[in-house]
Image (cartoon, rainbow, N blue to C red):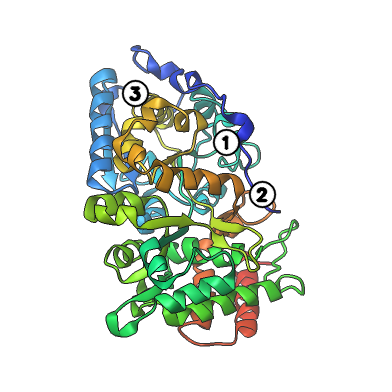
Amino acid sequence: MRKKLFFLTMIGVLVVGLLSGCLGSSSKPSTSDGEKGTGDKEDYVIRVASTETGPETMEVLQNAGKAYEEEFGIKVEVEAVPLADIFTKINATHGTSAQYDAFLTGYIGHISILEEQGKLAPVDDIIENIGGKEDFYNGHILFPIKGKTYWIPYDYNLAYGYIRTDWLKEKGLSVPKTWEELVNVAKEFTDKEANKYGLMMPLKSDGATNWVTSSLLWANNVRIFDDNWNVILDSEEMKPKVVESLNLLKELFPYMPAEAAKASYAELTEAFIADQVGMTFYSGRLVDILDQKKPELGENFEVFGIPMKDGDGVAASLGYDSIAVLNSEHTDETKKFVEWFYNEKINEFLHTFGVHYFPAQESIYNSEEWRSDEVITKYWETGVEPQYELLKNAELHSIDSDGPETDARPGEVFEAFLIPKLFQKVTLNNEDPEKAVEEIADEIRALIGE
């Protein structure tokens, strides 16, 4: 079940597919009687919830809404909603006067659960009009459900390692290639009296731990479900692998600062930029942030994949960001706005965090328009190309994409934060890893009604 993506044969994908589409024209969108989205344009507003809450990105989104209204006469409002709150807010407002028509999210688990609840509109037509599924790295990131696609990714967002190369040089060490080397580097980097630690991995019950720390499981080929949706976390074959990964986490834990217990995304970057840790684990956003806050660090880091136990490869947590369309009174018009946005504004949007927003479409990755961004050019060799190498060669997996197909069950595991709970048991609570695996596997069975 190893999900390695090989894309070397796809470099010739044409940008022209992205630039086509019915909303690239100046004709105004319209709807026919009986379809969702009917009525006078002044009667409604397309409401979009954005988990991309940075001021630069929000400005692009809000300006896109204004431009769309000027061109088509339909008002679009974009509201910033933190990623940790988006799923709850979508559910709480659905069917009310405050309902959103579209939203941005970073988890396929959100999509699989909302689709099961009947709240999402398929977007295969948009995918086709902006380049087709082949342009999305042969469709690997689309995660269709029963043959239909319910989100449009705009970036790959893998979780991988960053390491201080100046710290390595000072200690006479190299980038770790095995678990033993990873622990040794963490140990050598740690000087608690000087408030310096080997690494930071989040242990809080939230999406950051779900996404980042779970990479230790994928680095040992751990899976939660088998091909028949049986929970196999504590099976005879899988349990030893899980226990090995948990023991690795226990070995690394003493070389983390105390903040790891409550760490989320912000702490991962702050500890690295503040010289508190020599290794951290995050996406390309770390490069964008250090370029803004501590550019001198740009000469002293290296990207690395999470090493497999014996050095026979690397892993990374699969991540992605996307836009989805909700079933509402304005679904048709909302889809037209989303398609227009991907055709007209996507590069401007991606450039707000150039290294972080690694394009989900190969035509964009290969386009001069995207590559010409100043930050992308500056960190091409150190921050961009390494992501592409991981995308092609690393063991990629995530909690919410586990199982034989896209389904709400791994999404429910993700939202219940049971894997973070497993990590907390063996680190914060110092519980026996074998017993912890058995307990969490039973909780997963109870959760999904197995």
Tell me the number on the disc at residue 137: 1
Marks counted in the figure total: 3
The vertical placement of 20 against 142, above or below, is: above
Where does label 3 land, which residue?
39
Please report contact status of discs 1 and 3: CB closer than 8 Å, yes or no.
no
Where does label 2 land, which residue?
405
Residue 63 point in image, percent of width and height:
23, 32
Q: Residue at x 29, y 23 (%)?
A: 41
Q: Amino acid at mark 1?
A: Tyr
User: Is residue 379 left or right of 179 when viewed as pictured?
Assistant: left
User: Is residue 44 left or right of 232 when viewed as pictured?
Assistant: left
The vertical placement of 279 against 391, above or below, is: below
Q: Give whichever of discs 1 and 3 has the lower sequence position.
A: 3
Per the image, label 2 sits on a secondary structure element best described as loop
Q: Nearer the viewer, residue 359 or 107?
A: 359
Question: Quadrant of the rendered structure where residue 179 is?
Answer: bottom right
Q: CA distance from mark 3 to mark 2?
A: 39 Å
Q: Residues within 10 Å of mark 2 (few under 14, many from 20)?
A: some
